[in-house]
C-alpha cells in the first residue's frame, strides 16, 4: 500500500511542496539537496536491486526548482568525475 501512495503522489505532482528544512524564499539549497537525494536514492536502489521509480519524486522536485543550466552542468560534472557533491 505504501508503494501505491508514493505512485499516487508522483502521479498527482504539480510543483515542489513546502519543505520545512528550507523555509526561506531562496530555494537554491532545496534544489541542490533534492538533486543529491535523487542520485543517492538511485545509486542505493540500483545497488540493492530495488525499484528506482521511488526516486522519481526527488527528480521531479529538483527539476521544478533548479535552473536547467545548473542541472546540465552538474550532469556533465558527474560524468567527468568532477562533481563537488557527495553521492
Image: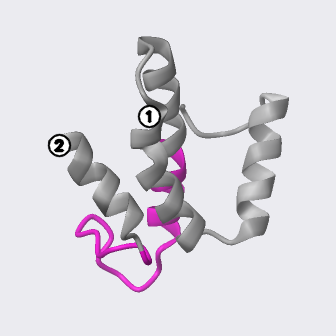
Measure the alpha-carbon separation of dots 1 and 2.
17 Å
Quadrant of residue 12 within the rendered picture:
bottom left
The residue where tag 2 is placed is 2
Percent x, y of residue 57: 42, 54
The residue where tag 1 is placed is 41
**What is the magenta range?**
14-37
Quadrant of residue 23 within the rendered picture:
bottom left
- Point out the image quarter for the N terminus: top left
Q: Secondary structure at mark 2?
A: helix
Identify whether 57 is placed above or below 65: above
Q: Residues within 10 Å of mark 2 (few under 14, many from 20)?
A: few
Residue drawn 52% across the image and 25% down it: 43
Residue drawn 33% across the image and 52% down it: 7
Residue 82 in sight in this render: no
Q: Is residue 17 magenta?
A: yes
Q: Are marks 1 and 2 in contact (CB under 8 Å)?
A: no
Percent x, y of residue 18: 29, 75
- The colour style of the image is one colour
Q: Secondary structure at mark 1?
A: helix
Q: Is residue 9 left or right of residue 85?
A: left
Q: Is residue 15 magenta?
A: yes
Q: Residues within 10 Å of mark 1 (few under 14, many from 20)?
A: some
22 and 40: which is toward the camera: 40
Q: Is residue 57 left or right of residue 71?
A: left
Amino acid at each position: 500500500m505504501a508503494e501505491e501512495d508514493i505512485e499516487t503522489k508522483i502521479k498527482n505532482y504539480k510543483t515542489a511542496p513546502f519543505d520545512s528544512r528550507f523555509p526561506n524564499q531562496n530555494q537554491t539549497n532545496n534544489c541542490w539537496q533534492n538533486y543529491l537525494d535523487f542520485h543517492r536514492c538511485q545509486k542505493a536502489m540500483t545497488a540493492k536491486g530495488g525499484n528506482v521509480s521511488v526516486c522519481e519524486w526527488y527528480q521531479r522536485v529538483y527539476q521544478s526548482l533548479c535552473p536547467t543550466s545548473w542541472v546540465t552542468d552538474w550532469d556533465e560534472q558527474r560524468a567527468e568525475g568532477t562533481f563537488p557533491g557527495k553521492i
